[in-house]
Image (cartoon, rainbow, N blue to C red):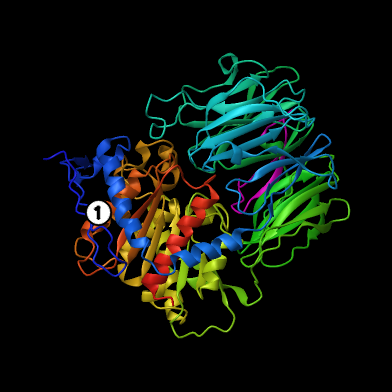
Amino acid sequence: MSLTLSFSVLHGAGADSPLTYPKTRHADVVDTYHGVKVPDPFRWLEDDNSEETKAWVKAQNEVTFGYLNQLPRRAALRERLQKLWNFERFGVPYKRGDRYFFSRNSGLQNQSVLYVADSLTAEPKVLLDPNTLSKDGTVSLTESAPSEDGKMLVWGTSGGGSDWQEFRIKNIDTGEDLPETLKWIKFSGASWAKDGSGFYYSRYPEPKTGAALTQANKNKTVYFHKLNTPQSEDKLVYARPDQPDWGLNAGVTDDGRYLIFHISLGTDPKSRVYYKDLQTDGPVVELLNDFDAAYGFIENVGPVFYFHTDLDAPRYRVIAIDTTKPGKTGWREVIPQTENKLEGASVVGGQLICEYLQDARSMVKAYDLEGKWLRDVALPGLGSVGGFGGRKEDKETFYAYSSFTSPSTIYRYDVASGTSTPYRVPKLDFDGSPYETKQIFFTSKDGTRVPMFLVHKKGIQMDGSNPTLLYGYGGFDISLSPGFSVSRAVWLEMGGVFALANLRGGGEYGSEWHDAGIKLKKQNVFDDFISAAEWLVKEGYTRPAKLAIQGGSNGGLLVGACMTQRPDLFGAALPAVGVMDMLRFHEFTIGWAWKSDYGSSEDPAEFKALYAYSPLHNLKPGTRYPATLVTTADHDDRVVPAHSFKFAARLQECQAKDGPPVLIRIETSAGHGAGTALTKVMDETADAWAFLAKELGIQ
């Protein structure tokens, strides 16, 4: 076979002209899984450093942008997105020492800026502006951890959207950075020693040259970095070379007494918890050592540790373990499981602040440390909250509240009185009053009752004419709840209906809901999403030609699986950074960690299930698939772009000759999503909405 890539590109083609896609070379690659031969002709696209792959990317982008450039609404949508995004946004403040820290974006800054203030009323000062670190805004601030006295700061950056971070240390008083730089850090924060002498963090071994974006990440290790010393002198705190798949992270308790190790295996919520007494420099104690449940350390009161756990409580509860007598018979239930999922808990001002999900909507309750209910925290409406961080001695905390039609407002919460006071209220060019939000429940294929949020203009006609965007995720115990999005606000202004389905595989109802959508039960997730689409059609909200589906990462897999299983049900599809090759996902970067949700092609039964829904392997030639805009990025080292490359190439081959366009948009200097420059986010959103406007017939 020829090693050259043949391109036949129709330059300057209009949006209504026939598209000619780049011809993607077939390689003679066949794998055998448990006696089943599976061709993989586009294996060569996995090498993102090869000249052939780079040429393919260039040719695909030429076709894609040649099409997008002709879309009539694209420029106006980009202009509207920019105008709407141009509003002041704040992160949730937190206090260290006598200082408050928070993020702020003046409106159109590519990256939010970190500020520090001596009080809530003092004039804040810029502490770190990541926009000055690169010309194109592609270097993002990934970590900001002040020391306990608020005088030093660990700050981490990522370039081009990669998950890799570099840590530096800043003297907050002088604004100067210490000389050392710490590298090869991923999925780790920084936790300071109480005396400020240094901090604990986790890192991976340095990858092979040229393989940083693809090599599997294993053997994570905990180190202590002493200030003003090179990384090469960092002290090894804990390593498990006998368990290369374990994820090791460590944090110091608020009182500085203990170092808590949280140990995970892939993305499975089940965890182990070890600890070390820093006061005595004692050994690492294996407190919870069975991977039998999820254990989230909340706080300690002396030797008594509080945990958020689903042990014998699929919707979670709070327990206390006295480490001087750690046997299970001595464990104390502090807050029992309720009918609602306990999403998380924190201790502030001597109270346990508990965030619950009631049918995927936030509710918050306050208890004392013995588990006595004190009050419900009043929230403005049907929405989501985040925050409530702090220390045991704090008298205040902060949280953010948002809904589908109202952007994030920051509230100050007085712990003693339970009073919430608006602290930062955003002002933007969007009126949410013409829209309504409601929650409905539909029945999935197997009879399961599944919730879905609907947002749309009041008084819409139920005649099947409404362009509708259905969004989902359904995986990794992640909960979706109401929240504001500038992109979705523009979609609503376009006359669109937005639907968010809370699928199995997520965490909305606890561990049982999650477990019902993993491994051999993963098809339940796709059945839920398809049933949501069928409900929207049946109830008259829309019809297949007007219905689009959207999801990213695991949600990209969701879109890919559903559009291959039911191509007749959707008019358009937007799979973003999706996991599309379910037989080889574990070969790259952190992909092996997803086996806890997906299973693995190495297992015969799991291979059969994966092969049955893997988007790449279930495309059939001559099928009329929905209009599709696949999106990925060249620096995505979480879901490597090869997934999208191979899927798009096969989809273009299989699309019916008279079918709508199937395109791939490959962003440069961007990654899986976090930290992406705002200009790139606006560009990609404008392209996606203009694509949907064309394909769904939005005037």
* Label 1 Cα crowd, 10 Å radius (few <14 / some 14-19 / many 20+): many
Inspect this view and state whether residue 546 appears: yes
Tell me how many marks there are: 1
Q: x, y percentage for residue 630?
A: 36, 56
Residue 558 lies, with reference to residue 583, above or below; the image says below
Q: x, y percentage for residue 244?
A: 45, 27
Quarter of the image where one finds residue 114: top right
Magenta residues?
306-327
Is residue 314 part of the magenta span, yes or no? yes
Residue that carries the numbered disc 1 in the rendered image:
650
Question: Quadrant location of the N terminus?
Answer: top left
Is residue 209 part of the magenta span, yes or no? no
Quarter of the image where one finds residue 66: bottom left
Left or right position of 185 against 194: left
Question: Quadrant location of the C terminus?
Answer: bottom left
Left or right position of 555 against 356: left
Quarter of the image where one finds residue 102: top right
Under tag 1, what secondary structure? helix
Residue in the picture at 28% in, 60% down: 12
Left or right position of 104 against 264: right
Left or right position of 246 against 578: right
Q: 219 or 179, which is in the foreground?
A: 179
Q: x, y percentage for residue 688?
A: 43, 62
Q: 147 or 477, which is in the foreground?
A: 147
Amino acid at pointer 1: Arg
Residue with the most extreme right position? 417
Inspect this view and state whether residue 221 appears: no
Residue 638 lies, with reference to residue 66, above or below; the image says above
Residue in the picture at 32% in, 42% down: 584
Q: x, y percentage for residue 282?
A: 69, 18
Q: 18 or 309, which is in the foreground?
A: 18
